[in-house]
Amino acid sequence: MQSTFDPVGVATDWLDAYRAKNVGAIVALYADDALIECRCDGHKTIAGGAALTAYWETRCAEKPALGLEDLQLLDGAVIVSYLTEDGVVQASLHFDENGKIKFCRCRPVDAKR
């Protein structure tokens, strides 16, 4: 069965919600069993609804997204590069068959430090 969701559309919704600091909208885009691997400040893995919510509350407060730098579809995943106060961060969003984010890996690519 062919998937009918638009991964670029979901990625755009994800960045729009992040820029708006709308934690509920961000978390709603993730699958129940989603995993985030964040390499922005060290290396941490986030799993589970409460942990995702706490992660995004902190992330929106401390490292808000300022604008889109680049967005590419690559092998079913969407690579989103966005600007923060510390430089450009790249997030790769991988989706399940329902169009929910199953796995996200983020890392800085252009730190201003």
Image (spheres, rainbow, N blue to C red):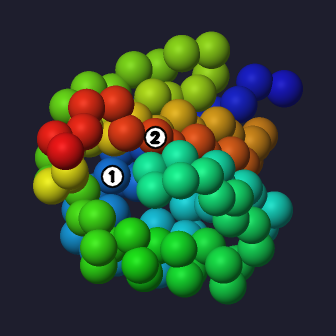
Give the x, y percent position of residue 16. 28, 57
The residue lying at 67 percent from left, 85 percent from top is 50
**Res 7 seen here:** no
Q: Residue type at mark 1: give it.
A: Leu
Secondary-structure class at tag 1: helix
Q: Which residue is mark 1?
A: 15
Residue 107, numbered label = 2
The residue lying at 49 percent from left, 29 percent from top is 78
How packed is label 2: few (under 14 Cα within 10 Å), some, or many (20 or more)? some
User: Residue 19 vs residue 104: left or right?
Assistant: left
How packed is label 1: few (under 14 Cα within 10 Å), some, or many (20 or more)? many
Determine whether 84 is above or below 93 in the image: below
Q: Residue type at mark 2: give it.
A: Arg
User: Residue 79 vs residue 43: left or right?
Assistant: left
Determine whether 51 is above or below 4 in the image: below
The residue lying at 54 percent from left, 15 percent from top is 74
